[in-house]
Image: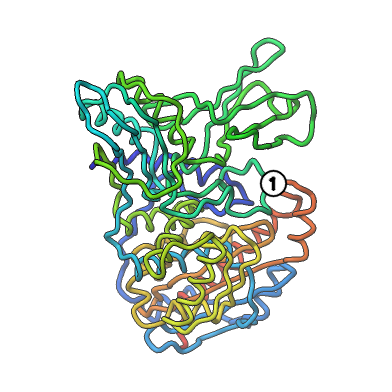
Amino acid sequence: MRTIFTRRAALALLAGSAGTAALAEAPLTSLRPRPRPGPASAEEIARLAPRARPSLADIISSANLGGSVSVAVADVETGEIIEEQDAATALPPASVTKALTALYALETVGPRHRFATRLLATGPVADGRLDGDLILAGGGDPLLQTDELAALAVDLRAAGVTEITGRFLVWGGALPYEDEIDDSQLDHLGYNPAVSGLNLNFNRVHFEWARTGSDYRVTLDARSAAHSPVVSVARMRVENRSVPIYTYAADGEIDDWTVARAALGDGGARWLPVRRPALYAGDVFRTLAQAQGVTLPAAGRLEETPGGIELARHDSPEMEPIIRDMLRYSTNLTAEVVGLTATGALSGRPDDIPSSARAMNDWLARTHGVSTAVVDHSGLGDASRVAARDMVALLSAPGVMGRLSPVLKEHDLRDAEGAPMTTYPASVRAKTGTLNFVSALAGYIRTAQDRDVAFAIFCGNLERREVAKATGEEIPDGARPYAARARNLQQVLLRRWGLVHTG
């Protein structure tokens, strides 16, 4: 087994590329929990608490968000609601959905599960020749990178293989194939890739361009820490236009992209989604194997479940650290893989993402008695609905905090000017969620009195969101100011609930 931890750099890049419209709010460096002091004194609380305590309705109104805001906070120990406003109003939870998915996977698949990617031979190996087919079989690993495929290529050569007499096949059938997570998103968004049982580089290809005289040099490669093999399953053409910036079409098994010359400037790079991830992985592995002196034909698909002799394998990290990184970097592919895997463990391989999401809704109702209506496992689809009261009921249900709190990211508390409050006598662990004109936050507060409360804050101006979607813009006018006002409201409420426990 090999585990290469440079994937964290890829996770940070994935999260950082998404912008306001993305479901990713990753820091560039990992955050470590700060040591907490003991319960704050009554004098300290009195010093920090406002003299006049405004009503929750007044605080929400002053945020000037428009649309709807659904808010609830409850004592974890007793489940008693401390404060709420429109708590039964169901709104898109955005990436807060990933907290539901995390619980689903931890309680069905378990924290120790690993995803295996294997090289299988259908015949014997003798004198450097595999007399049969070679199969690259995915197990759903959402973190597999080019460097790890390169290690498998080294292992293949170490197993004595330099050529094969049969086919080179790829199998992604461990999970259902989806050509994108949410079909309402723009085609070129790297955080909305395909999903399958064989994934690579978060199913993204690295597009880079540079001006050369009056033209551009463009490359598409499968970049990771140590390798950048050029790919043949995607291509890019620069066209003389201003808009749209990107177009996409499927040309057989090729992802056919064009980009507007007017948008390129002197040079740059971005990640684009891959729509045929299993063939993408096969294309990259073939190049890496050739570098090891192993000659392979072009990859073909294998539809049935593979069999054969295992020549090499790569095992992913365990499920719990995968989930921790998923929640920290808000990676949509990881969330969908984790959710689909949980449904598979519970009731067999699902047909698609929506049916798996329905299975998760049913499981949450049956196991924890809460009502959710999510349409995927990542929160990318804005048709999902969850009410703050139901989210808080789940977070304060018996045993849930023990599962979720260790994997949730520490959330900074900030003052009215936006500066971190490093000595504030309360701490927060939570999951954020952001779509254009949707902002969500849910998790746990350890209050100044050393009590644990669960909270959910769901904000959505759905009318403005629909208007913005019609523009086709990645970040439409007004989306950033809305997100900033919503984050400010969240901070005001966190400071309020962290200081005074009224349950």
Residue occupying the point 48% across, 57% down: 336
Residue 477's x, y, as percent? 76, 50
Amino acid marked by disc 1: Glu
Q: How many marks?
A: 1
Query: Residue shown at 60%/21% (left/top)?
Result: 218
| Rendered view: 436 above or below 284 | below
Work out which quarter of the rendered image holds the N terminus and state it.
Answer: top left
- Displayed quadrant of residue 107: bottom left
Residue behind mark 1 = 474
Query: The C terminus is located in which quarter?
Result: bottom left
Along the line of sight, the residue nearer the viewer: 48 or 242? 242
Give how far across and how far down residue 377 sits, in percent.
51, 62
Q: Is residue 484 above or below residue 118?
A: below
**Mark 1 nearby-residue class (10 Å; few <14, some 14–19, many ≥20):** some
Task: Identify whether 78 is placed above or below 488.
Answer: below
Left or right of 176 on screen, residue 292: left
